[in-house]
Image (cartoon, rainbow, N blue to C red):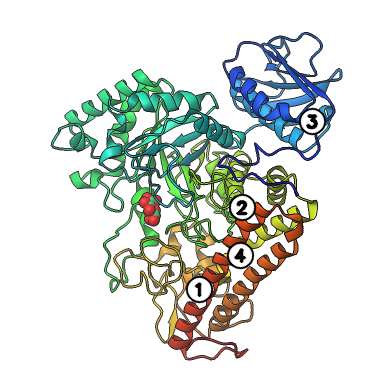
Amino acid sequence: METVTTDREACWLTTESSKPRTEKLLLSLVGDAPMFATIRRLCQNHAAKFFVETAITDRDTGKSNVIIGTWTSLGKESTPNLGSEGYTIFSEEGRLWIVAEEERGLLYGFYHFLKEIQLGTPLLEISAQEKPANVFRMINHWDNMDGSVERGYAGRSLFFEGGSFTKDEDCMRSYAELLSSVGINALTINNVNVHEQESALITNRWLPEVAWLAKLFQEYGLTLFLSINYASPITIGGLDTADPLETSVADWWERQVERIYGSIPSFGGFVVKADSEHRPGPFSYGRTHADGANMLAKALKPYGGHLFWRCFVYDCLQDWRDRSTDRARAAYDHFAPLDGAFADNVILQIKSGPMDFQVREAVSPLIGALKQTKHVIELQITQEYTGQQIDVCYLPPQWKEILDFDTHANGKDTTVADLVSGRANGGFGQGMTAVVNTGRDENWTGHSFAQANLYGYGQLAWNPKRCLHAIAEEWADRTYPYLPKNVRKTIVSIQECSWIVYESYTSPLGIGWMVNPGHHYGPNVNGYEFSPWGTYHFSDRNGLGVDRTRKGSNYVSQYAEPVGSRYENLQTCPDELLLFFHHVPYTHVLTSGKTVIQHIYDSHFDGVEQVKAFIAAWESHKQELPEALYQHVRVKFDAQLANAVEWRDQVNTYYYRMSGIEDKHGRTIYR
Ligand code: GCU
């Protein structure tokens, strides 16, 4: 039995082929694109192992079987308009051509070639014409300089340790390859909660290190951004204010930005979390978010920099007795009235849902409400509320549902995907960003299956319309080529239903939360119920759920019609979001025909059985699996089962006690 590598870098890009090819690779890199150095390295590290022999030349000798170059360097007439990142692959006169307008397109074209080589496609049958749907395909690291990672479930930070940079070039290059191989083109390296140490990243003390990283990532088409502390003029600048309308503050930022671009010409700009969860912001000075953002954007503008300004702004010091404040309303209430007031290099960063990356929530109504402001959607790849890379929870089906959601913002068929890509709003949509799930653990993400979330994110950010099943299969085929096909099929089917399984044994019907406060793993029905965070379910002996209808918090009115009315109406509100929008009695009958209480019991019992079925499927392949991989996943499954059982028993017991209603099937509920 072949042994599986469990080293840190094992991934879809690094696995060996089970079927080595019989050809030689004679590759010509035509032209003088700096990106060719990267392509050469990728070829040596990843492509060469598939061929009996590999040779690379820097001009077309006529003998090469694969030729890479821009339309100009190859002296060919550019046909399709695929932009700076698009590429074409075609065969002509018995040779394969990878051609693009610009060098980043060449890089992505080469990755495409690599993928097909891995999957065993005959050389001359490789063909593609690709262009990314989104301008920004970004990831955000929530890494701190002490090496910890906020909401990180894959070990220590890749970038930092002990208050300094790790500066591990091999690791950084492998990581840059991992990201760019799925089309990601921008990243932040530090946490949105910028503490004292990280505030200094923009100073001379750390700029050389940031510049080193930025240059390395740039070689892979990745633009580096930093998260900044809004109060930096005070924290590191010695001023007594961070008021955006104070000239001294604006001047201070201008000087910082000038210094940054002096060291890092490719620098992307800043990401800002302001006036959110105790982070400083313009509210302290009676200024608006537009005032705050525009001042920073002005400093970045001369260098082509962008300012990502997060819309995760809400009152986190609520009183649970106050039913008039609804956290779900906050992003829209703060930002929709400011539409059009932001500078053109400000990009608002909107969490996909109005609360906070729950296993299920409605789509943020702010997406679609912004008609004249640039924006991106923010997703969470790291599994904070979705199993923390212990439980399997493959998230692309959730993201696809969000991206396919019809907001009706510009009439029927205005999907989130078309809004964030800018297709439906004249370019105001700027793409996607996501909190990433990687760290220094083995295979980058701790749980080997969790890698698929990063893979799927990259694929959907490149093309939100791509078939989900194809993405899942492709990831499994590339990551585990040494496994028999039937085992890969099992892995794919577990992945594909895992989000729904996770949902079934956690918080019911879209209500969210019910997690242990602080770390957010495991059940605690009332963990946040009487806390200041504004995350309530309002369960009592009569019923549960949040009334967000017109008679309640009126959150439904933030949606375009007929979406708002669909949620308002009990008959048309989808079951899976019922408790997100309505407070109902336990005996309320869902469109599925079950009562709410029976649904709670059934889904929680069922969720545990499904996890047992995952384990049984895994066990059935024990003989076909390398021991290390078998054990790696089995250990996680055992922990997932324990978690699912705990959720089932806590939630069912809680609602049995609250409602006093028996389970129709008489199963054991811990009374
Ligand atoms: C969540 C998460 C925090 C994070 C915040 C954010 O609340 O638990 O750790 O800082 O989101 O997105 O800013």
Give the distance between the C-alpha atoms of the residues marked 2 and 3, in whole angstroms.
Answer: 28 Å
Question: Mark 3 or mark 1: which is in front?
Answer: 1
Residues packed near mark 2 inside 10 Å, few (<14), some (14 to 19) or many (20 plus): many
Residue under label 3: 126
Q: Which badge, 2 or 3, is on the more N-terminal residue?
A: 3
> Front-most of 187 and 117?
117
Amino acid at circle 3? Ile
Residue under label 4: 500
Q: Which badge, 4 or 2, is on the more N-terminal residue?
A: 2
> Front-most of 383 and 341?
383
Asked which secondary structure carries label 2, the reply is helix
- Residue 596 is situated, as x and y percent measured from the top left of the image, at 54, 80
Residue under label 1: 647
Give the distance between the C-alpha atoms of the residues marked 4 and 3, in whole angstroms.
Answer: 35 Å
Give the distance between the C-alpha atoms of the residues marked 4 and 2, in whole angstroms.
Answer: 16 Å
Q: Which mark is residue 449?
A: 2
The reply to whether callout 4 and callout 2 are in contact (CB within 8 Å) is no
Amino acid at circle 1? Trp
> Front-most of 500 and 384?
384
The answer to whether 377 appears left or right of 413 in the picture is: left
Asked which secondary structure carries label 1, the reply is helix
The reply to whether callout 1 and callout 2 are in contact (CB within 8 Å) is no
The answer to whether 334 appears left or right of 131 in the picture is: left
Asked which secondary structure carries label 4, the reply is helix
Residues packed near mark 1 inside 10 Å, few (<14), some (14 to 19) or many (20 plus): many
